[in-house]
Amino acid sequence: MSLSIDSSSQVLENGYEHAELLSGNNDEHEGVMVNMEKPMDSKVFLTALRASISLWRKQGKRGVWIKLPIGLANLIESAVKEGFHYHHAEPDYLMLVHWISESTTSTIPANATHRVGIGAIVMNDKRELLVVQEKSGKLKGTGIWKIPTGVVDAGEDIFKAAVREVKEETNIDTEFVEILGFRQTHKSFFEKSDLFFLCMMRPLSFDVQKQELEIDAAKWMPFEEYTAQQIVEKPGFYKCITDICLAKVDGDYIGFSPRLVKSSFTDQLSYFYLNEQDSNSS
Amino acid sequence: MSLSIDSSSQVLENGYEHAELLSGNNDEHEGVMVNMEKPMDSKVFLTALRASISLWRKQGKRGVWIKLPIGLANLIESAVKEGFHYHHAEPDYLMLVHWISESTTSTIPANATHRVGIGAIVMNDKRELLVVQEKSGKLKGTGIWKIPTGVVDAGEDIFKAAVREVKEETNIDTEFVEILGFRQTHKSFFEKSDLFFLCMMRPLSFDVQKQELEIDAAKWMPFEEYTAQQIVEKPGFYKCITDICLAKVDGDYIGFSPRLVKSSFTDQLSYFYLNEQDSNSS
């Protein structure tokens, strides 16, 4: 059933006669999603919200979502007073949610908890590593060379993010080879955690052009010169990266490769990263 | 410099004489974090915010963060009017941010983009798989048996989440063996993406007791009976899981194991997941 704020008034048993109702879309889980778009007086909103919740309870709805664009920040306080809490926020909107069912336990899904990043190992035939110096961050101004790194956007495949970041920072075209490993860190930003995927890449072009905005310098550097840097040489995260890199280049190290797999429920495709070599040999 | 709302009034050049100032803590990136805790009238807040921003600009601050507990939702509209936008939200607070520097480009870090989950393959010596039927979700009421799955919390190590979820759902104690692979899916909830880690576990106890809240049934099931289920047998995600499981149990499949690694900058420890076997042999 679709409700509308400007629908003809409805009579409800609990006294909300002729009250306007909020427009909502039903979801698959006995929930209602209210997507507020037009400006509204907060008192009008509060009255409509109360009447709507009363109706939704009668209809057996359990969870109610309200998406408020940042321009409608005047309505947040009313929603909170009616029992809503925050679910998540992006720069331009706030999502609120309220479990209105009194007889069932909330099954509201968790908010996103992790940021995802990549680091790209790109080595040419002369055993030179593609390295950069960044204009900001921990290594700014230290003269230390590092591998290209970057953030994986929501909705972006990890291996595509690696190709994109290398291209953006150095103008080098690459082909993704494997994920060699990944690191999980905590409290990397407020309470959120971080997943960093170390990617092996094959260069397809060789003319380095640094990006002006974020990158101070970029070049091909002899691998042994890179590893001789103090921060890379001492035990720790950087050394772990070069050890795995050497195991891949000089040894038989096998990482995870992306395989396109269909959902078991729908036609949706997504990438499953696995040890493709061992998987095939069995 | 530490500011305080109840400090003696300060004289500012632009007319905010004697205005109260918001209390803020400086961060490492020329930023200020305002942690609002006490209730405040929205007009008083607006005046204090304007005066504070004026002062912070003079001090060369670039980014200003305001953390508002849900009880202070009345202050959001004022902050938005002054140029703040949302950064992220948790059930009980909203984080707003405003890049006040006019001469530099915003370096405000991205919000969390991914939810992280685990699936646990637990097999005993009789080649029986630990399986459950859930009380909610896609498979509710279908009679289909699945491996235990769950959500990794912010701040929780992936392999520890796998041990915890198996214990919670089935009361079986396990030892983590390896991550066999992982899947990345998009738009799994609103615009967020999802990372699902397939974990191989070794059972340490064998007496199954299902959890009442989420689990309808739990048991040890002959592996071939599990794979004969239609949804597991047909090509797709479920089949991919059993193929990798077979490659591990009957073949030489090697996944990623957690290695404790120190940061290259601090003493902070975190887990790096890698192909430990190939890494050592090189």
Image (cartoon, coloured by chain):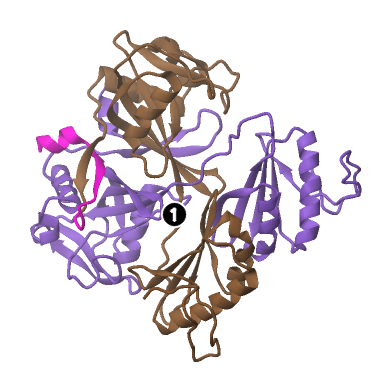
Chain colours: A purple, B brown
- Quadrant of residue A203 in the image? bottom left
Q: Does residue B86 belong to the magenta stretch?
A: no
* Mark 1 nearby-residue class (10 Å; few <14, some 14–19, many ≥20): some
**Residue drawn at point x = 39 percent, y = 73 percent:** B2
- Give the quarter of the figure containing the N terminus of chain A: top right
Residue A252 in sight from this viewpoint: no
Question: Quick one: A263 or B90, which is closer to the camera?
Answer: B90
In the displayed structure, B121 sits above or below A228; it is above
Q: Does residue B278 belong to the magenta stretch?
A: yes
**Residue drawn at point x = 31 percent, y = 22 percent:** B174
Whole-percent x, y for residue B189 in the image: 55, 43
Whole-percent x, y for residue B168 in the image: 43, 25
Classify residue B272 as left or right of residue A50. Answer: left
Classify residue B12 as left or right of residue A79. Answer: left
Q: Chain of mark 1?
A: A
**Residue drawn at point x = 81 percent, y = 46 percent:** A51
Question: Quick one: B236 or B151, which is closer to the camera?
Answer: B151
Classify residue A270 as left or right of residue A93. Answer: left
- Give the quarter of the figure containing the C terminus of chain A: top left
Whole-percent x, y for residue B153 in the image: 42, 40
Q: Amino acid at mark 1?
A: Asp
Q: Which residues are magenta?
A: B264-282
User: Circle 1 is placed at which residue position?
Assistant: A153
